[in-house]
Image: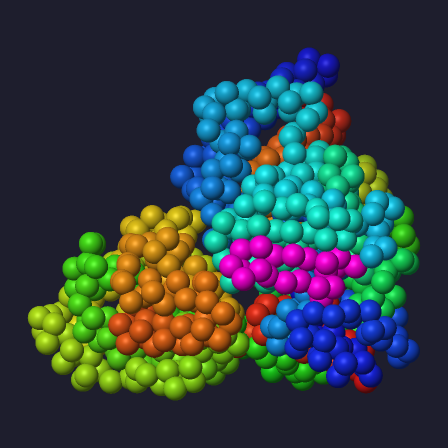
Amino acid sequence: MRRRMLAFAAAAAVLLTAACGGGDEAATGGETTGSTASLVLGQTDIPASFDVLGYASGTKTQYFTAVYDTLLRQDGSGAIVPGLATDWAYDDTRTVLTLTLREGVTFTDGVALDADAVVANIEHFRGSSTPDLSNAAYIDTVSAVDATTVEITLTEPDPMMLTWLTQPLGYMSSPESWENEDVATNPVGSGPYVLDTEATVVGSTYVFTKNPDYWDDSLQLFDTLTMNYYADQSALLNALQGGQVDAAPFNQFSALEQVEAAGYESNVSRLDWEGLMLLDRDGALDPALADVRVRQAINHAIAKDSILSAILLDHGTATSQIFGPSTDGYDESLDGYYTYDPDKAKALLAEAGYADGLELTMPSTSVIDQALLTSIQQQLADVGITVSYTDVGTNFISDLMGAKYGSSWMRLASSSDWQTATFALTPDALFNSFRTQRPEVDALLETVQKGTEEEAAAAAQELNRYVVEEAWFAPFYFVDNVYVSKPTLDVTPAADMVVPYLYLIQPAA
Amino acid sequence: MLRFLVRRTVAGAAMLLVISTLAFTLLYLTGADIARNLLGDNASQEAVDLRAAQLGLDRPLGERYLDWLSGAVRGDLGTSWFGGSSVVDLLASRLGVTLSLVVLSTLLSAVVATVVGVWAAVRRGWVDRVVQVFSMAGAAVPNYLVALGLVLVFAIDLAWFAPTGYTRPEVSVGAWLASIALPVAALTVGCIAGTAQQVRSAMIDALRQDYVRTLRSRGLPERSVVYRHVLRNAAGPGLSVLALQFVGLLGGAVVIEQMFAVPGLGALSVASTRQGDIPVIMGVVVVIAVIVILVNLLIDLAQGWLDPKARTA
């Protein structure tokens, strides 16, 4: 995963390697002098299972990457760097990916991590009902060319493929462990650490010890690694105030000062956008939303800055776009595209024929900040749009995907162009539930998917501008993602992951 | 006595059956898209359909319940949808934690509440009023607030205890006691309050009885009157309320375990509810039901021992 691998002296060398997108990183061999004996991480999530059915990234990343190597990794800024694969290359059609594997790596049960093991892992993933199954959607065949070469053939180019290989699709576990009865709780990988099943209490505390045979010193900066799960926000706060954890995600903005007063530093990244999805752009359910002026009016009606202060206590950045700051499609000038202007909103509504107002029904559920929903309701009411909420409980996501609501609150990740597209823009995207399709968008999407890196980046920018101008969404802001750490640690937030990858947490120099 | 036991056991089993049927039906009929919730927002429909089929969610509810039940009577509560570990193992690893909290808290409450309740009833006057006020306050303050206060003072300011976490007694008895001291204290406060009140009024009632006057007139030492005779008569209501408190503590443990990040049944039930891990939730429901039924049975037996008249009731 995203590893800014760097360790100490070797940082420059590694970043160079990373930039070249290849090469051998064994050169890192970071000195571990000054390493802290133990690292205790606070967690707000638990791994559902260490077997393929529970594979996950996001808030669960640190658990999995402690025990599993990934085929590729990412440095902190989002660039792909070597992992188990030291080299990788696409053919001209971008549909055949050839990976060269590091030699001599074994799983902790002694099984060799060779091309056959990699093929078996990818096939295992594809044959399961893992939550990330769609990551393998474009994979046609996987084959071992020789002991250290794997060829992945795609049905069409997948701009996310290299990224997927840094995530669950790239997790490598010993094929011989899959039939073990305790496969879910006793992972057998080749990663930097081994789960100490004796000391671990599943669902509460996970204790890891060093994998004695590990090949990359820069990933083993601590002798022991402990991850404590805090289901309750106030328990996490107490643990931080009591100094029980060295680092943890902490997004309870109202208590952040307390945590900082207890001696922690905040490391901030921007990953998610929050705002409204205006899904029914052809007016199937809410005819008014078919008019671009209505969608623009909604954008002008929201006082982003005041919501940002009231709800997030200013821990965010107002924006009008859904492409995140770390993506190629991001265009800083679009952050201020729509400003709060209720008069303009009313004028646009009048132009569109809704001078007398209009009504929208949106889904709500208890996990959404109710104060935020009320603010949205109030501000839209101020320009004549009456919002009524229907509580849909745990069906929130399925109702949205089932096109039961023309518009809705949403908070979505936006850390890469193609992910943003497949989440929200492509005709079959999860959150393009009314299947909006425009020829100009199709053409841009095609380039983002199949073009060279430069072409894809340019197309993503154009796509972003189109979506903003057409007001497919009404984004409010990018939300600060905060990871707190003790001053004894150097933490680099990851550009595309909600918690830092393990190697981004290092003893302070 | 044997007949009483058999009758109660059969009633308990019937109750268990009703509870499990209800719970099973309610859990599976929530209308939520179970497989979707298990896999999360980003999962493709393909993965969701596959998982639903793997979990047998496409089979009729009655059929699934009978499967579950036939497993349950053989001591097999299925496997967790997350993690794939056996539900019985999961419960076993968590049960001890919760029971140590709840049992310690109950014992502590019983001792303190008896002392305080008897003291208030015998001395009356200002002692009684002070006890009453504290009892009211103790019962009125929710235990999570008590917990919060204890953490702030004893864990964060004074740093005598760790604010969160749990050490198993096998690792170190001292560390184990330290790790459960605050959670037990937080649970105990409300429990003492409720029980002391009950002991106090039962004692006052008993002290007013004719036999007390008779005993005293015979010149029995006051200590013997109060502790040998009156307390024994007053113990019945005290025990009943303690049983109620015990059941209440199981509920309280849900919140307290969360706050102190203690891996007990309560924390397990919250985590599995959040994840939608129905087999585990069912397991928790069954275990809690069994505990409650057993406690009631034990209390009935104790009442019978204290007061032979209760046996025929």
Task: Please name the residue shown 34% across and 56% down the image.
Answer: A427
Q: Is residue B49 above or below residue A252?
A: above
Front residue of B262 and B128: B262
Report whether B146 appears left or right of A216: left
User: Could you say where residue B91 lies in the image, as x and y percent from the top left?
Assistant: 70, 39
Give the left or right position of residue A434, taking residue A193 as reference. left
Measuring from the top left, give residue A205's x and y in whole percent.
75, 56
**Residue B308 placed where, x, y %?**
71, 23
Quarter-of-image position of residue A190: bottom right
Q: Quadrant of residue A166?
A: bottom right
- Give left or right: position of A254 versus A354: right
**Residue B267 sits above or below residue A238 on the image:** above
Residue drawn where x is 45% and y is 71% of the image: A456
Q: Is residue B181 magenta?
A: no
Relative vertical location of residue B244 with respect to residue A336 in this rendering, above or below: above
The picture places residue B276, in percent across and down from the top left corner, at 54, 44
The segment highlighted magenta reads A82-102
Q: Which residue lies most toward the front here?
A: A92
